[in-house]
Image (spheres, rainbow, N blue to C red):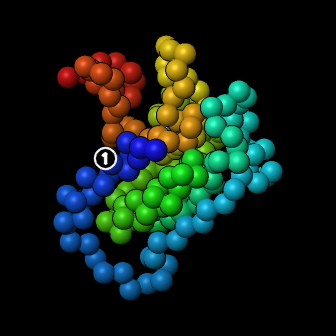
Amino acid sequence: MKKIFLIIFLSLSLSTILSIETPIKSNSEEMFQSSTSSITNKIFQRMKYSWQEPAPVNIKNIRYITLNHWGFDGKIHVGEIIIHKLVADEVVEIFEELFEAMFPIERMKLVDDYQGSDDKSILANNCYALCVRYVAETNRWSKHAFGLAIDINPQQNHFYFPHRFCSTNRSIWA
């Protein structure tokens, strides 16, 4: 299976980010921490917007991850994300590299906190992955539907359609 775009993109981008000197951490509270689990009943109950049948992936192949990250306020926050199990370990490794580079992530909540709305999540500058849905204006599953795409700081990182870029308000920009 191909690596998800995020992993390839961030792996290439991190060489630039990591070349910047970062302070040595002396406090155990500043150490990266994460936890990965299967989807429990409690988590599944929260997924009333992001998980719908039919889905292109079995819920048994999805993982819930909590991890700490640097916020835009320069403080450490605990975020959560749901991702496909095939890439879960790699995603944790990437977020650990981002943490070590002190790369800020404004918000990291389940898209269900935004009623499953991509637009509301984008406006909140939320980092999320799993949301069972189609690619806009198509009948093809989105990579988000498989848990194989992650939006990170979408207000700063605009998305791309072939032959054009779109801002977070979905208007074309050059």
Coordinates of residue 34 in the picture (x, y in percent): 55, 67
* Left or right of 155 in this view: 48: right
Q: Give neighbour class at mark 1: few <14, some 14-19, many 20+ (Cα, 10 Å).
A: few
Residue at the image point whose x is 60% and y is 66% from the top: 35
* Left or right of 146 in this view: 25: left
Residue at the image point whose x is 71% and y is 27% from the top: 54
* Residue at image mark 1: 9
* Left or right of 155 in this view: 45: right
Coordinates of residue 164 in the picture (x, y in percent): 26, 20
Front residue of 78 and 60: 60
Q: State whether residue 107 is above or below residue 73.
A: above
In the picture, the quarter occupied by the C terminus is top left
Query: Considering the numbered disc 1 on the image, is that residue within a helix, a strand or a loop?
Result: helix
Coordinates of residue 155 in the picture (x, y in percent): 38, 37
Name the amino acid type tagged 1: Phe
Residue at the image point whose x is 75% and y is 46% from the top: 44
* Left or right of 43 in this view: 112: left
Q: State whether residue 80 is above or below residue 51.
A: below
